[in-house]
Image (cartoon, coloured by chain):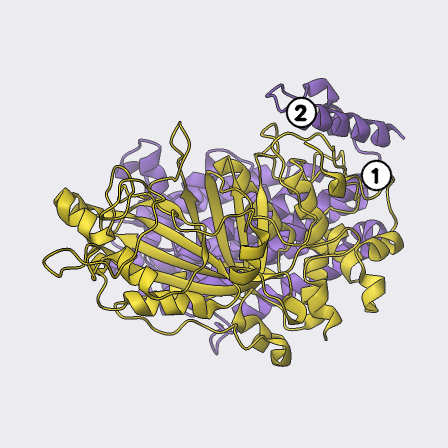
Amino acid sequence: MKNASLYAALIAGGILLTGCGNTEKVKNEESPATEQNEAPEVDLTTELSSYQQFALAQMDQFLIETENFVNLFKAGDIEGAKAAYAPARMYFERSEPIAESFGDLDPRIDGRLADIQEEGKGEEEWTGYHKLEYALWVENKTEGYEAIADQLLADAKELHALVQTVEVTPDLMITGAVDLLNEVSTSKIAGEEEIYSHTDLYDFKANIEGAEKIFEILRSKLEAKDKDLVATIDEKFKAVDDLLAQHETANGGYISYEELTEDNTKALAAAVNQLGEPLSRLGIILE
Amino acid sequence: MKTPNDEKWTNKKISRRDLLKYTGIGAAGVAIGTSGLGGVMKAMGYDVFEPFADNNIANKVNFYGNHQSGITTPVQTNIYFASLDVLFSSKEELQELLQLWTPLVVRLMNGELMVNSSTNTRIPTGDTGEAEGLGASNLSITIGVGPSLFEKLGMEHLKPAELKDLPHFPKDQLQKEFTGGDLCIQACADDPQVAFHAVRNLVRAASGKVAIKWSQAGFNSFPVDGGTPRNLFSFKDGTVNPSITDEEDLNKVVWVDKGWLKGGTYLVVRKIQMHLETWDRTSLKDQEATFGRYRDSGAPFGKTKEFDDFDVEVKDSNGEYIMPDTSHVHLARKSGARMLRRSYSYASGVMSNTGVHDAGLIFISFQKDPLQFTTVQNSLGRMDKMNEYITHRGSAVFACFPGVQKGSYLGEALFKAL
């Protein structure tokens, strides 16, 4: 009943407002927004723990694959390093809600030159995967980048150590799912993430998988609240996956972003936005 | 301002069954499964459906009536026009969409937010919120269907013969990105944000069902002492229009009188770029000869007042037409066809390829047959002196549903005709 009266108060504010045609604001006290961030009554212990396990497993694999990539890079194996680059990054992209929670490590590992410059830093402060991407695809060499490769591995190890202590909260999961899609909508779909290698579709896929994992973990809780919503989200994930599958290569990878037509990117963007709308309602499990 | 038609259509939280009844789904005899309308609305957070209407809402345009709003509604200052493509392929889904939209349109036109059913701050709000506190702002919403929709949904037998893409006209430079569409939402209001909010929220509520194909914002400014607004060529636009209160004349010019579209009308929209730089270096004399009217008064050539009647065939003592036979007004009048124009100006930055203003007219006209527009446009043809200063870049035609009575929903007559 508490909700009903708050709702009524909100409506009453609205009547007053439109009725008088004035600009008086609805007072914040009438808004139900303030008391919502308290601990939810819904028990998500199991879900939080399975997401933590998932994220930690991804981070384990990320460290292994990064080490492999760095070894190939430092051995001067340009083709080998190129082949290892995008798949290794997928582990990071899948668990980005967790990886991101460590302020300066994320840009050190995953920063693009444009991001670094936006922060007013110089090119010399640029490190991480994208700098090595530049070395491999633009310079077509590894010499001179060995220190960057070492630094990447050290950062990956530091990240791996830090995530062991991370506390997964309901908010991290719920916002994380939508944030992963937003990552896709704002940078991957525009080809702005992998401007040298054009392997954006790998990141795209990994972000989607990361969001889907969160949804899967929360599925039964969500089903208890709204079966139709679950069905809708299932359908929309499938639509995105089906579109992505059209751009898969024979070896299980993805075609270059440059090969996508404007119609392709538009269709992908639309599918992600249509998924994002229902997925943004995951928070109802905490009602 | 009394709006008896818009009183609260239910005063309690209604069940899905009630909703079906109220929106007329039951009457139409269409079965909606659990994943149907109820599911759609619930998925979007619209499961509390309590649109209320205050009979004394200021600056409110009526939703219910014989005709949709935004046609004979006094012209507002702003428009946000959106052409949409549908992403579904069945008639049932179109019906669900229109049933979903109808109560939302009622709310929007009341100046209400599409209130979130939830107090949960971990989910996005049901209304995007930017129109809060802005009131009804005379918002009108006009929904129409394009010719392509009938093909997509396999109901070509219901497509009126009049509803088809416009023919190519001389000097047309139509661009795919401003042309056509399965559905349109014309939102007009005396506030740009209210108009945009309406389109944004209707599209959001239909996520996964429609995609915006193209859209255009526009504006109209009215002289402080009243009268006809001027377009960006600084001439009065809309002088020769049927009176929006002359029902008899509107029946002749605007309202369709047969079939499921009876009480509806055809909307023609043209995105017309106006080459302002070129116009601005044209002498006033030539500008006036282009229109066939004096710029300041708006009077036709040979007359002194804007609304003075004129005869395009009248010649001076030298045998020359008083109103040049290449002028816009001469050619339009000579066609003999009439329509209700409801255009807005637009200014959308600069053309990336030339650096000139990307500005012009979002021309909109309503007529009982698109042929009325075609007749005028063909008469303008290659002769129109105006062609030198304008380029038609976008075009679409839509059949706008008849008005909605309480208990019904947008487009019900179409589904009854199935």
Q: Earlier in the sequence, mark 2 or mark 1?
A: 2
Residue B345 falls in which quadrant of the image? top left
Q: Chain of mark 2?
A: A
In the displayed structure, A20 sits above or below B167; it is: above
Residue furthest front as drawn: B317
In the displayed structure, B270 sits above or below B304; it is: below
Q: Is residue A261 visible?
A: no
Residue name at image x 27 percent, y 48 percent: B300
Disc assigned to residue A13 = none
- Do the CB atoms of the residues marked 2 and 1 lie less than 8 Å apart? no
Viewer-nearest of labels 2 and 1? 2
Q: Chain of mark 1?
A: A
Quarter of the figure that contains the N terminus of chain B: top right
Q: Which lettered chain is shown in yellow?
A: B
Both labels 2 and 1 in a single chain? yes
Q: Determine whether, in the image, residue B7 is placed left or right of residue A264.
A: right
The kind of secondary structure element at disc 1 is loop
Between marks 2 and 1, how big is the CA–CA gap? Answer: 36 Å
Report the residue marked by disc 2.
A17
- Identify which residue, B123 or B105, lies in the foreground: B105
Disc assigned to residue A42 = 1
